[in-house]
Amino acid sequence: MKTKLLILKTNIRSKKKLQLLSPVFNGHRSIQRWSVDLEDVDKVLRVETNEPIEEHEIIQLVEKHGFYAVDLEG
């Protein structure tokens, strides 16, 4: 399967907050690689996957932990 890249705008504003999500993303079997650009005004979350996972699933994971995530275009 081809690598899929999901790009979302978030409200993750610090490394401390990011640490709350690290175990969630690191432990997810569908997520190969992920990062949050804390320097970017949109605090962009990038998620790479080779397995079928949809944007709304990533949004739900983020929201479940007290943050928001939306399509960067939205």
Image (tube, grey):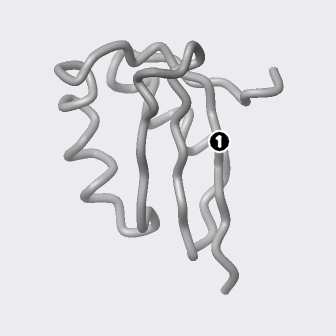
- Residue 42 x %, y %: 59, 18
| 46 w.r.t. 10: above or below | below
Residue drawn 67% across and 65% down?
A: 4
Q: Is residue 19 left or right of residue 34?
A: left
| 23 w.r.t. 52: above or below | above
According to the image, label 1 marks what residue? 7
| 48 w.r.t. 3: above or below | above
Q: Is residue 1 left or right of residue 22?
A: right
Q: Is residue 54 left or right of residue 27?
A: right
* Residue sitting nearer the eye, 3 or 60: 3
- Residue 19 x %, y %: 19, 31
Residue drawn 36% across and 68% down?
A: 29
* Residue sitting nearer the eye, 67 or 19: 19
SS of the residue at dot 1? strand
- Res 62 → quadrant: top left
| Amino acid on which the number 1 mark rests in the picture | Ile
* Residue furthest bottom in the image: 1
- Residue 20 x %, y %: 20, 29
Q: Quadrant of the C terminus?
A: top right
Residue drawn 36% across and 15% down?
A: 66
* Residue furthest right in the image: 73
